[in-house]
Amino acid sequence: MERLGTLEVKNLSKKFRSRNDELTVLNDINLTVQPGEFISIIGSSGCGKTTFLRLVVGLEKGYEGEILLDGQRLNGPSLKRGVVFQDHRLLPWLSIEKNVGMGLKDAKSDESRKAIQEHLELVGLKGFEKHYPHQLSGGMSQRAAIARALVNRPGILLLDEPLGALDALTRMYMHQELERIWKQEKITMIMITHDVDEAIVLSDKIVVMSSRPGTIKKIIPVPLARPRDRASYDFVKIKEEVLEEFQLHTEHPFTYTI
Amino acid sequence: MSITTNVATFIRTRYHGLVSFLALFIVWSAVSHYELVSAEYLPSPPAVAKAFVKVIKSGQLGVSLGSSLVRIAEGFFIGTTLGFLFGVAMGVSATAERLFAPLFNALRQVPIIGWIPLIIVWCGINEPSKISFISIGAFFPILLSTFEGIRSVSKSYLEVAQVFEYNRIKLLRKIVVPGAVPNIVSGIRLSMGTSWLLVVWAEINTRSAYGIGDLLSSAGDGKKPDIAFVCIIVIGIVAFLINELFGHLEARLSTWRKSYR
Ligand SMILES: Nc1ncnc2c1ncn2[C@@H]1O[C@H](COP(=O)(O)OP(=O)(O)O)[C@@H](O)[C@H]1O
Ligand SMILES: [Mg+2]
């Protein structure tokens, strides 16, 4: 289990500066993620979720506060933190197996081939090794992107609205798949979403964000047994609790259509 | 696929183009058959066919075509290699772009034929001059398309590479250049077309050795319009084949871009 790390975010603030403007996107974010936890971040568009994720990945620089992984400050992107971007970002000129092998040092070695095969199986894409991204559906592309992010066995997987573009049924199927992968890989997952059901089905904790500037409004634990029943009383109660966080802001009712 | 089905598809898809060739051929046959123009100026189709057989049998056509193709290969190789390297450098590095872009943009304005006098002064009229001339012609299309191709590679793929800790070389080899391939191949196709045009031009104008252009211009000097016809037809056919070949290559290597959502 040593590859898992504790992520600590302390007093994190992020500003984007343009020529004569300064936009505070994130303000005083504090969050601790334990090894093996599944965390969802939920909030309206533009509240800074992607920015937060990019900071944790190391793609965004220049922030105040601290982002610590096992007590160490982050220093740029690393193979220890896998990412699934909102747009899958598979390389269109590479076959699925080559895409999945992108992060491996020597993708041709026997060990690498085995890892690629295993991860294609993990995401249910066995038999699609030689296909190209344009031949896959949206859900399959996201699964390939998940396999690519997992193939180096990162301790943390960050997912930016990975299921945002999928239809409702594929989404529910992918929830089962994600949960299975999370259990099987024993990995920490931090997922951005704006689907409340999705967050409750999958997460140990739900981080509710408010916008302008993006702050953490509430962290809601989800102490329900898995797999979760969307129709159960406890599930609905937690859903109400999450939704309440958004309805509080009646002064901007339209900003919070989730 | 068998050759006959290939030919059948070809005729079906290019049918309209063939009509105009056929029409031209009929007019030509009629004009020479009824001797509307003297055979001294316009050889008849059978005369051209005979000349064709003659130059093939004597080996003249083979040697000429062969020398021209070797020349092209050399000039094209030098020009595209340099163009590709500068294109990559300028595409990847803003400093290289600032350094070279103004120079190349200025030089690009010179019509290729405008280089001839200087090239002759520098390289004489033998092989080196022809090859330099073709190299210059092949250089610019590939330079521009490589540069543009690299600049068109989405920044989001570069971020993927960052997450996978790619170093600069791996970034170039795995993301930047492959992403630019469709542009690069279309540049190669343009360069190749230009090279063929220029080799004929250079051979006609700086006559010295064998070449399809030499055969053509000596046919003009020797008042042998039948040989000139043969040369023009061969030049056209080779240009067509080059275009087809590189067109297929381009289509094959660019499928991912066309079908990419
Ligand atoms: N590179 C950037 N430069 C300037 N502003 C940015 C940049 N990236 C994001 N923003 C702004 O930050 C805010 C939050 O964006 P984002 O993190 O993408 O939100 P979310 O993912 O929650 O929808 C938006 O107002 C967006 O316009
Ligand atoms: Mg976002």
Image (cartoon, coloured by chain):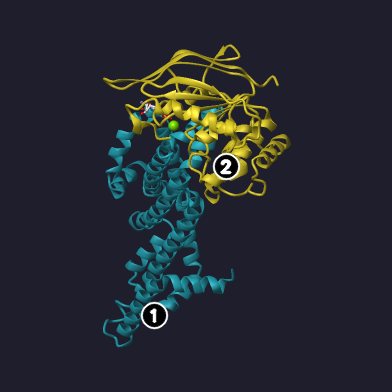
Q: Residues within 10 Å of mark 2 (few under 14, many from 20)?
A: some
Taking the spot 40% from the left edge, 39% from the top edge, the residue there is B147
> Which chain is assigned cyan?
B
Q: Chain of mark 1?
A: B
Per the image, the residue denoted by label 2 is A172
Q: Is residue A227 left or right of residue B187?
A: right
Residue B215: quadrant of the picture: bottom left
Taking the spot 40% from the left edge, 32% from the top edge, the residue there is A45
Mark 2 C-beta to ligand 2 under 8 Å: no
Per the image, the residue denoted by label 1 is B45
Q: Which element type, helix, strand or loop, lies under badge 2?
A: helix
Q: Amino acid at mark 1?
A: Pro
Q: Chain of mark 2?
A: A
Up/down of A102 relative to A35, above or below:
below
Q: Amino acid at mark 2?
A: Met
Residue B145 image point, x, y percent: 39, 44
Q: Is residue A21 left or right of residue B166?
A: left
What tint does the image give chain A?
yellow
Residue farthest to the bottom, as pictured: B34
Front residue of this view, candidates A169 and A160:
A169
Q: Residues within 10 Å of mark 1 (few under 14, many from 20)?
A: some
Residue A33 image point, x, y percent: 58, 19
Residue farthest to the front, as pictured: A233
